[in-house]
Amino acid sequence: MRGKIQPGSSVLLLGTGGVSLFALQFAKTARAIIVSSSDKKLERVKALGADEGINYRKVPEWDQRVLKLTDGQGADLVLESLGGSTFAKSVNAAALNGTIFVIGFVGGAEVSMPVLPIMQKMLNIVGNNTGSTSDLREAVRAIEAATIHPQIDRIFDFADKQKAYHYLETAGHVGKVVINLNN
Ligand SMILES: NC(=O)c1ccc[n+]([C@@H]2O[C@H](COP(=O)([O-])OP(=O)(O)OC[C@H]3O[C@@H](n4cnc5c(N)ncnc54)[C@H](OP(=O)(O)O)[C@@H]3O)[C@@H](O)[C@H]2O)c1
């Protein structure tokens, strides 16, 4: 809602982790572009509805590729789940008057970059901290209406919680890594 996404908008998602894949499912009416370290993962997310995939290991200048894929316009919404390592490229990949959701810091919690492109593009930089209870109600309603099933990569028992965190750190997953509190 805050990204003002409509059919025909483009959305850029960084990585194939839990946040990106839930956003992909919400972004279905828009054109979703996703970057990942792995061609195999990109094939999997295309099967889930991603329109374009860019391997950031093979294409380190993925911001330029996003511009090319959007006829020079850039993405209307960028979900910035990486932070320091990608922020400047996310700004380059964003459209004029586009929105960057600042969600996470998998790639570092500090950002250093020129302010000029943010000004020139008149970007909306929006901090995100989970949202309100009423946002959650709306999200649950949308999930029900669109029969969205979360992409769960693997479920660990509570006793194996350390293994779950280790698995998450190695980033072999696509979607959510879950710890079952009942087992
Ligand atoms: N603000 C909030 O309300 C909120 C809510 C939930 C989570 N978060 C935060 O959001 C962040 C992401 O959470 P998550 O659960 O999605 O984490 P995650 O499942 O660990 O996903 C992170 C993904 O980042 C990708 N990645 C790593 N280096 C990259 C690079 N250089 N360029 C592009 N992509 C790269 C990897 O994708 P590939 O494996 O495909 O390469 C990895 O799977 C975390 O910092 C978390 O704390 C914030």
Image: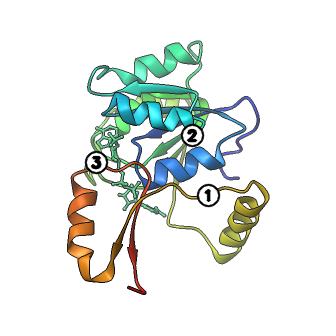
Q: Is the residue marked 3 within 8 Å of ligand 1, measured from its CB?
A: yes
Q: Is residue 93 above or below residue 111?
A: above
Q: Which mark is residue 149?
A: 1
Residue at the (28%, 58%) spot, across then down? 168
Residue at the (76%, 66%) spot, across then down? 141
Kind of element beneath mark 3: loop
Q: Amino acid at mark 3?
A: Gly
- Outermost residue on the bottom side: it is 182
The residue that mark 2 highlights is 48
Q: Is residue 27 left or right of residue 102?
A: right
Q: Earlier in the sequence, mark 3 or mark 2?
A: 2
Kind of element beneath mark 2: loop
The answer to whether the residues at label 3 and label 1 have Cβ atoms under 8 Å apart is: no
Q: Is residue 26 left or right of residue 115?
A: right
Kind of element beneath mark 1: loop
Q: Which mark is residue 13?
A: none
| Residue 115 shows in the view | no
Q: Amino acid at mark 1?
A: His
Tell me if mark 2 has few (under 14), some (14-19) or many (20+) residues whose alpha carbon lies within 10 angstroms of its own: some
